[in-house]
């Protein structure tokens, strides 16, 4: 059976905004997670363009090594032109970072040429970046070849779609995500090396808010055989039908809907070795256990002023095992400090 890599989503949704969108808090964003094939390092790369600050977009970059070394960028830079070589708005870029859609739902590229802060996973998960940390030069070029249909949250499970109609949908914003295989070239402080890996691309356009958010567990990975999984769940809360949705993919055909029956909620902050095994179940009763353990953990550092007990967001990369097959993939989790062992 052939694989429709668009998943039925219009190709136009791969285009970025050609000009500032109308309305406060409207975002245009591309984010990717990449795990090197042998778990030597992993990357999280993103450009967040917000209508309120359209002349500068925010760049997010973590290059996290299994040794604990992390290279970080968190800054706003001048916006790059969105018009690509084909004359369409296929580029989302800011300062040193540039994403380009080469072919919708098939090929994207990411490139960076700038400086990053030198830190460690231990210091990063402590929640701050010292202003006097050393910097080093970083350049990379990555080609991303999509390997599964995109998952559009709310489209697979009826109850999940209903949950996203309200406030829970505003936490996530209109989006879809797609697994890929990556080939890259990187140079750090002058030292060059090539790499291959797996990754997840997230494409998001629309309004997004964070106030009221109470946590989540989000995971995804692509295996060598072509099979894959992805899932996202918000913690159950009294009086609220929590969002809970995911998929498994055989490597052929379409995504099969599943829900999470056992999630690895975030309860502590460590630099690696956290268990992230997840248990999924399909409507036909099929139960899937995917064993996981993180090999490097980082942390999202956002605004300095946050509401009391606002969830801490951990971004990590894991080794996963499913029916004897192993791979590397992503995991992002968040929990309020009051529910964690800090």
Image (spheres, grey):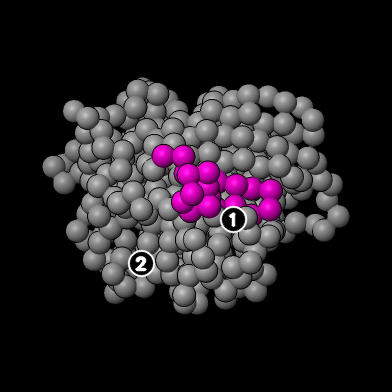
Residue 99 part of the magenta-drawn span: yes
CA–CA distance in space, label 1 to label 2 = 30 Å
Relative image position of residue 150 (x, y in whole percent):
33, 44
Judge from the rendering whether residue 238 lies leftward or rightward of residue 112; answer left or right.
left
Residue visible at 22% across and 30% down? 2
* Image quadrant in which the N terminus is located: top left
Residue sitting farthest toward the left: 284
Q: Callout 1 environment at 10 Å: few (<14), some (14 to 19), or many (20+)? A: some
Question: Is 305 situated above or below 301?
Answer: below
Report if residue 117 is visible in the image: yes
Q: Does the magenta stretch include residue 242?
A: no
The residue sitting at 32% across, 61% down in the picture is: 243
- In-image side of 212 versus 55 (left or right): left
Q: In this view, does 143 lie above or below 86?
A: above
136 in relation to 241, above or below: above
In this rendering, position of residue 9 left or right of residue 206: left
Quarter of the rendering occupied by the C terminus: bottom right
Q: Give x and y (percent) for residue 12.
A: 36, 53
Residue toward you, 4 or 241:
4
Q: How far across and down, in percent of the image, does residue 228 sit?
A: 34, 34
Residue shown at the point (20%, 44%) measured from the top left: 282
* Disc assigned to residue 81: 1
Q: In which quarter of the image is residue 40?
A: top right
Please give the residue where the numbered disc 2 appears in the rendered image: 169
- Identified at 25% across, 33% down, the residue is 3
The answer to whether residue 83 is left or right of residue 63 is left
Q: Which percent across, then down, holds residue 158?
A: 19, 58
Q: Give the range drawn in magenta.
A: 83-103
Disc 2 residue crowd, few under 14, some 14–19, many 20+, Cα 10 Å: many
Question: Could you tell me if residue 341 is visible in this image?
Answer: no
Front one among 319 and 10: 10
Element type at mark 1:
loop
């Amino acid at each position: 059976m052939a694989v429709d890599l668009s998943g039925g989503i219009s190709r136009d949704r791969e285009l970025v905004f050609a000009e500032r969108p109308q309305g406060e808090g409207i975002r245009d964003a591309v984010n990717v997670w990449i795990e090197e094939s042998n778990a030597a390092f992993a990357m999280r790369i993103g450009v967040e363009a917000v209508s309120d600050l359209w002349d500068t977009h925010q760049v997010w970059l973590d290059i996290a090594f299994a040794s604990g070394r992390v290279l970080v960028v968190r800054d706003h830079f001048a916006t790059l032109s969105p018009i690509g070589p084909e004359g369409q708005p296929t580029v989302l870029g800011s300062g040193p970072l540039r994403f380009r859609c080469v072919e919708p739902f098939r090929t994207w590229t990411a490139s960076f040429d700038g400086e990053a802060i030198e830190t460690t996973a231990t210091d990063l998960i402590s929640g701050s970046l010292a202003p006097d940390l050393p910097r080093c030069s970083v350049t990379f070029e990555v080609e991303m070849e999509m390997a599964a249909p995109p998952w559009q949250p709310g489209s697979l499970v009826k109850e999940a779609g209903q949950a996203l109609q309200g406030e829970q949908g505003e936490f996530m914003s209109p989006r879809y995500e797609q697994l890929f295989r990556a080939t890259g070239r990187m140079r750090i402080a002058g030292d060059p090396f090539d790499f291959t890996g797996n990754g997840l691309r997230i494409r998001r356009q629309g309004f997004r808010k964070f106030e009221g958010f109470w946590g989540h567990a989000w995971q995804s990975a692509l295996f060598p055989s072509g099979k894959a999984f992805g899932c996202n769940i918000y913690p159950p809360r009294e009086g609220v039908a929590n969002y809970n949705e995911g998929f498994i993919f055989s490597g052929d055909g379409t995504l099969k809907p599943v829900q999470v029956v056992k999630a690895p909620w975030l309860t502590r902050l460590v630099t690696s070795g956290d268990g992230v095994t997840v248990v999924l179940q399909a409507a036909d009763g099929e139960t899937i256990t995917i064993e996981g353990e993180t090999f490097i953990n980082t942390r999202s550092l956002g605004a300095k002023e946050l509401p009391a007990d606002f969830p801490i967001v951990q971004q990590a990369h894991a080794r996963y095992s499913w029916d004897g097959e192993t791979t590397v993939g992503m995991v992002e989790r968040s929990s309020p400090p009051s529910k964690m062992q800090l």
